[in-house]
Amino acid sequence: MCRNNLQWHFFKRNLGFLQDGRMFCLSPAVMSWEIIVVLIILFASLASFIAEKVSVDVTAIAVFAALLVISMVSGSPQWPEVGELVEVFANPAPLTIAAMFIISVALEKCGAIELMAQRLGKLTALPYGLFIVALAIGVGGISAFINNTPVVVVFMPVIISLARKMGTPASQLLIPLSYLSIFGGVCTLMGTSTNILMSSIIKDNGQAPLGMFELALVGVPLMVIGTLYLAIMGKKVLPVRETLTAILSEEERKEYITEAYVKQGTELDGMSFGQSGLKRTRGIRLLEIIRDGVALAGDLPSLPLMAGDRLVLACRPTAIVKAREEIGIDFVGERGLDLEPISAHEGAIVEGVIGPMSSIVGKTIREINFRQRYRMVILAVHRRGRNVREKLETLPLDFGDTLLMMGTDKAIENMHSTDDIILLDRPQLPAQDMRRRMPLVIAVIAAMIGAVTFLDVPIFAMAVVAVAVLLLTGTIKPKDAYASIEWRILVLIYGMLGLGLALQDSGATELASSQLVHLVDDFPVSWQPMVMLAFIYLTTSILTELLSNNATVVLMAPVALALGQMLDVDPRPFIIAACIGSSASFATPIGYQTNTYVYGVGGYRFGDFAKVGIPLNILYFIGSMVLIPLFWKF
C-alpha cells in the first residue's frame, strides 16, 4: 500500500486489486460532479427510507432508474455504464436469498417449527430466566439455518398462550422472542440475508466468501451474552404492556352477534343505518346488510335500507334492550320468521397481525370490504405504540399492524386459511398432512449445509438444488414457493447494489474512506485498525436501526474493504464487524422485521425497545470489539 504524508492512495477499481499484475496508486478522489450527484441520490434515498412516505422497494426502483438515466445522458467514465448497472442482476446473492425464503416456508409448512414451539409448552413451570434460556436454544437454533421471520410468526401465538399459563405478561416474552431469533441468525452464513449478501459482495471484490460457520466464532459467544442479559434483566427492563383486548371494558368483551330485519312500511325503510336511531345507540355495530341472500358491499352505514333487509349486528348486552325499542326492525329470533338465522350467540374477540406479504397492505378497511371478505369486524388497530379506534374505515393497513377483530367461531376458523392476517389468540392449525415431509425437508437442509461447509460448494448452487428437490417432490407447491419470496427485499437489494456500484465508480467510496482514515492520524499506528473497527461497527449498527439491514450492508461493505486496503491490513475484521452490526438491531422496532412484528402485538411503545435494546447493543459492541480481533487478525 502506498502512503505519502497525509495522502492516502486507493486502488481505482475493485477496491485495490491487481491490474495487469501490478499495483498502482492514484491520488485521492476530488469532489467531482459525479460524486456530488451520487451523494445526493444516496442521501435522498436514506431520507426516503427514514420518512417511510413510500415503500423501500419503490425508493430502490427510483434510485436505480435515476442511475440509468444519468448513465444514458452523461457518458462519464466515472459513472457506471448501463451495461454495468444491468450486471448487478447477475449477482447471486438476491437469488440465494429468494431460495432461502422458499426453504424456510417449506420447513414451516411441514410443521417442524411448530413442533419445536409446542415442546416449549412443557417448560412453563420453569422460572422466567430458565424459560428464556430454553427459548434461546429453540428459537436461536432454528434461526441459525432459516429466515427468522417465519420462526417468529409461528412462535408468537404459542408464546402468547404460554405467557397466560406462566402468569407472565406477553410483553415480557415477545421482545426476547424477536431478539433471540436475531441472535441465532448472526451465527451462520445462511442465518440472515445480510450475511449472504455480504459474502457475495466481498467475493466479487476478490475476497474469500464467508464460511458457513465462520461467523459462529463471534456469533455464538454473543448469543450467550445476549441470552444471559435477557434471562437476568428481562423482568426488570421489559415493560408490562396491555394487549389490544385489554383496552376493552368487560361489557365490550361480551358483544353478541345477532340479526334483525327491516320491516315494511316503517320510517326505517329507505333510511340509511347512519341516519337511524340504531347508529346513535351506543354499543351497536353494523357488520353486514344482506339483501336477497347477498351481502352488500361498500360503505354500509350510508347505504339506503330496504324492507326485508337483514342486518347483522354486534351488540353489547345493554344495547340489545335499546335496539328492541327501535321502530322499524325486528329481531329474527324473536319473531319466528321464515328466515334462516345467521347467528345469535356471543361473538369471539381475537387479535391478528398483518404479515409482510399480505395482499391487504396499503388498502383501507373500506376498500377491501373487510366485513364481507372475512365475516369479521375490526374493533381497533394497534400501530407503532398507539391504539387506533377512530376512523378505521379510512385507515390504510400496513405490515405489522395488530388488529382487534370480532366474529363468529366459524369466521375465525376460516381466517386460518389466509396468510393475510396471522391470528395471535390461538396457535395456527397444525399442518398434519405435511408432517410426513418433515424428514425430507430436514435432510435437504442438512445436505445443503454439509455441502457448503465440507465440499466448498457455493451456497447459491446448493440453495437452488435444494429448492428444486422440494418442488420436484411436491413438498412445496410452486404457487406457495413464489408467494413465500419477499420481493420487496429483493428489489431493495438490486437497487442498493446499483447505488453501491455508482459510489465506487464515481470515487465517492474512495473519497469517504480517505477522509475517514485521516481521522485516526493522531492515534498510534497500532491502534488505528482498532479505532476503524469500532467505527465500522457503530456506523453499521446505527444505520441498521434507521434503515433496512440489507441496504446498510450494501453501503458499508465497500467502505469496510476500502479501509482495510488503506490501512494496509486484512479487511476481514471490518467485514465481520459490518455483518454483526447490520444484524444486531435491538434499539428500535423498525430496524429489523421481527422487531416490527412484535411491536404492535405486545402493545409496546417505541421507547421500550430503546430501554431494553440499547444495553444489549452496548454488550454486542463490546463483545465484538474483543472477539473479532481475537479470531481475525489485522
Image (spheres, rainbow, N blue to C red):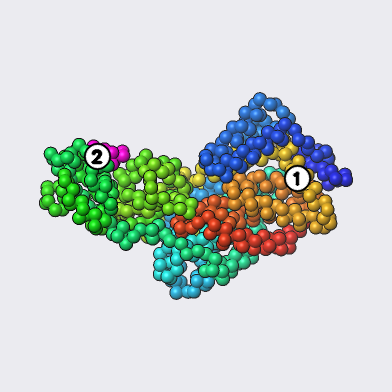
Residue 300 magenta-highlighted: yes
- Expressed as whole percent of the image width and height from the top left, the position of residue 79 reads 70, 32
Question: As shown in the figure, which amino acid type bears the numbered disc 1?
Answer: Ser
Identified at 45% across, 63% down, the residue is: 170
- The amino acid type, in three-letter code, at marker 2 is Ser
Question: 10 Å neighbourhood of mark 1: few (<14), some, or many (≥20)?
Answer: many
N-terminal-most mark, 1 or 2: 2
- Mark 2 lies on residue: 272
Q: Which residues are magenta?
A: 297-304
- Horizontal and vertical percent position of residue 39: 68, 37
Q: Name the dominant secondary structure of the magenta segment.
A: loop
Secondary structure of the residue carrying tag 2 is: loop
Q: Is residue 203 magenta?
A: no
The residue sitting at 32% across, 47% down in the picture is 374
Q: Left or right of 43: which side holds 352? A: left
Residue nearest the observer in this picture, 111 or 582: 582
- Distance of label 1 from label 2 (alpha carbons): 67 Å
Circle 2 crowding by C-alpha within 10 Å: few under 14, some 14–19, many from 20: some
Closest to the observer, 352 or 119? 352
Q: Is residue 634 above or below residue 63?
A: below
Q: Which mark is residue 29?
A: none
Image location (x, y in percent) of residue 86 = 62, 34
Q: Position of residue 315 (x, y in %)?
A: 25, 53
Which type of secondary structure does the marked residue at label 1 adopt? helix
Image quadrant where one finds the C terminus: bottom right
Image position of 16 with respect to 138: above or below:
above
The answer to whether any part of residue 180 appears in the image is: yes
* Number of numbered discs: 2
- The answer to whether residue 592 is above or below residue 269 is below
484 or 432, which is in the foreground? 484
From the image, tell me which residue sits under label 1.
Answer: 513
- Report which quarter residue 165 is drawn in: bottom left
